[in-house]
Amino acid sequence: MGGRVVIGVGNELRRDDGVGPAVLDLLRALRPVPPELAGVTLAVTDGEPTRMIDLWADADLAVVVDAVRAPTDPPGRRYELALPEAGAVGGAPVSSHHVGLGDTVALAGTLDRLPRELLVLAVAGADFGFGAGLTPAVADSVVPTARRVREVLSGHG
Amino acid sequence: MSHRSDRTLDVRSLARVEGEGAMHVRVREGRVEDVRLEIYEPPRFFEAFLRGRSYTEPPDITSRICGICPVAYQLSACRAVEDACGVTVDGPLGDLRRLLYCGEWIESHALHIYLLHAPDFLGYPGAIELAQRHPDVVTRGLALKKAGNDVMELIGGRAIHPVNVRVGGFYRAPTRAELATLAGPLRAALDHALDTARWVAAFEFPDFRHDHEMLALADPDRYAIERGSVVTTGGLAFEVRDFEEYVVEEQVPHSTALHATLAGRGRYLTGPVARYTLNQHRLSPLAREVAAGIGLGERCDNPYRSILVRAVEIVYAVQEALRLIEEYEPPPRPYVEVEPRAGTGRGATEAPRGTLFHRYALDAGGLVTAARIVPPTAQNQASIEHDLRRFVADRLDLDDHRLTHACEQAIRNYDPCISCATHFLDLTVERL
C-alpha cells in the first residue's frame, strides 16, 4: 500500500457529468504545484469499475470526485461520503454512471482491493444530456470542490 | 404473475449492459405483440458536434462516445479523414494501430466476459456475487483486462480516451524498449486467456440459433481488426467506400437511433460471432486450436455462445499483440503528414462489438462539413429485437421476474454498447 490518488469520474461531453474531470483539470493546472498535491496521482476515468479499482487498489487514500443524480436537491450541492457509506451508494439512480460507485466499492471490497481510506466528493448535477459545459450551479461547485480535495490531502500528509 | 396470457411488467433497470437504454416488450393474449429496443443515440449528437471542426479533431472528439471502445472510434475516424485526404497509413504505423486495437479488444472482451456475461451462465446476479464465490476467477479476469489496459496506456497515452492518436499516426511512437515492457504481462495474459477459454467452455448454452445475415470486415492477410473490406455470410463483398450503398438506415418511431439494414435484404448482425464466422480461417493456429477445443465450429450462430468467441478473440489478440511487439521497428516518424483537401472519406474498423463506420466530408480548408457514424449496436438493433421476439415467445411461461432476467441475459449476448447507442436502459414488459 502507498500513495494518494484523486480520481475525477465522468464525461466532459455529458454536461454536468463532467464536474469530476473539471475539478481534476483545475487541480492539474495549479502552478506552482501546491505541496499537498506533490506526488499525488491525478486521474480521470469514466467510472468503469475495474479501472477505478486499478487506480485505487494500492493507495493509502483515494479521493473520488463524481457527479450524482439527486433530483430533490439543488444542483451544485456537495456531499462527502467515506467508507462504509460510499459502499452504500446505489447504482444508476444515484450515480450518473451505468455501474454505480457502490457496486465498484463492493466489488473492490470482495477482492480486497479497496484503498485504505476512501472519500467520495459528489456534486448534484442538473443536466446529464449530451453537450459540453457545466450548468451554472455545478460550474460554481468546481472551485470549492477542488479546494476541499486539497484540504483532505493536506490533512492526510 | 406467471402463466397469464395478458400481463404488464415494468422493470426500471437493465443491469450489466454497457451504458443505459430502454427495452419494451408487450404481450397480448399470450402472444408477443411488440419488442422495441429504445435507443437514444449519442453518435447523432456527435455528428452535429463535429460540423465546423477541424479535420484533425474527429479522433479525439469521437473517442468520447464510448469509454469502453475509444480506440475503435479514434481509428475509424482516422481512416475516414485520411481517406478524405488521400492518405494511407500502413507499415509500422499501421501495425502500431493494430497493437493499440488489440489492447482494446483484450480489455473490452475481458470486461464483458467476467463482469457482465459470465454471471448469467453461473447463476449469479452479478460480478460482485461471482467475486464472492470465485475471487480467484474474477481476479484472473481483472488481470487479463489490465494487460489490455496496459497496452492502451503505453501506446495511447492513457486507457480512457487515448491522447496519443492523431490523424496520420501518433504524436509519439514508443521505443522498442518501451514496448518490450508489455511482453511479460502479455505472456501471463496468454495463460489467463487460455484458462478463460477453458472456463467458459464449461458453461451450458441454451439452444437458440439466429438466422441473420452476418457482416464483418475481412482482411486478406489477417483476422480483421483495424482495416478490411466488408463481407457478409450472404455472399456480399464490398469496399468500405460503398458501405452506405449497401447499408441503409431508417428512422423508427421508438428510437432516436436509425435502424440499419442491408439494402434489399433486411436485418443483419455484426460483432464477434459475425467476425468469427466470416474470418475464423484467418485466426492464428493457436486461436483456431482453442476454438476447436471449446466446441466452436466454422460458424457460430448461437448468440449465447458469443462468450466463447470473445474468449477465442482474446487469445488471438494477446498473441497478435506479442507478435507485433516482437516485430516492431519504430517508424521513422510517428505520423505521416495529412494535408486537408475538399472531399469525403470513409473508414471502418472492427470495434469489439462489431463493424464501426465513419464518414466525413471536408471543405478545402479542412473543416468538417458533414459527419456520419454508424456504430455496431445500431446496426444490430433490428436483429436483437427480432431475436428477442422469438426468445420471449418461447418463454412466456416464466414469471415476470424470471422473464425479465432472461431478457436481460439475452440482450447481454450481443454486448450492446449502449453508451454508443442509448441513453437510459429501462426494461418494460407489458402483458395485456
Image (cartoon, rainbow, N blue to C red):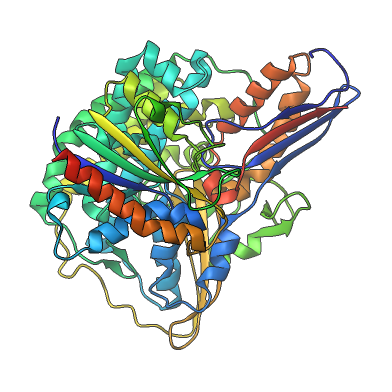
In the rendered image, residue B94, in percent from the top left (x then y), is placed at: 29, 60
Quarter of the rendering occupied by the C terminus of chain B: top right
Q: Is residue B343 left or right of residue B140?
A: right
Tell me the residue at 48%/51% (across/down): B217
- Image-based side of B240 in relation to B143, left or right: right
- The answer to whether any part of residue B113 appears in the image is no
Q: Is residue B322 above or below residue B95?
A: above
Q: Nearer the viewer, residue B272 or A156?
A: A156
Q: Residue at x 58, y 63 (%)?
A: B45
Q: Nearer the viewer, residue B151 or B241?
A: B151
Q: Is residue B230 above or below residue B210?
A: below
Q: In the rendered image, which quarter is residue A113 located in?
A: top left
Decide if residue B290 is on the left or right side of residue A58. Answer: right
* Outermost right residue: B29
Q: Nearer the viewer, residue B161 or A3?
A: A3
Q: Where in the figure is residue A61, as x and y percent of width and height?
A: 22, 36
- Between B234 and A86, the residue placed more toward the observer is A86
- Residue B163 place in picture, x, y as percent: 30, 60
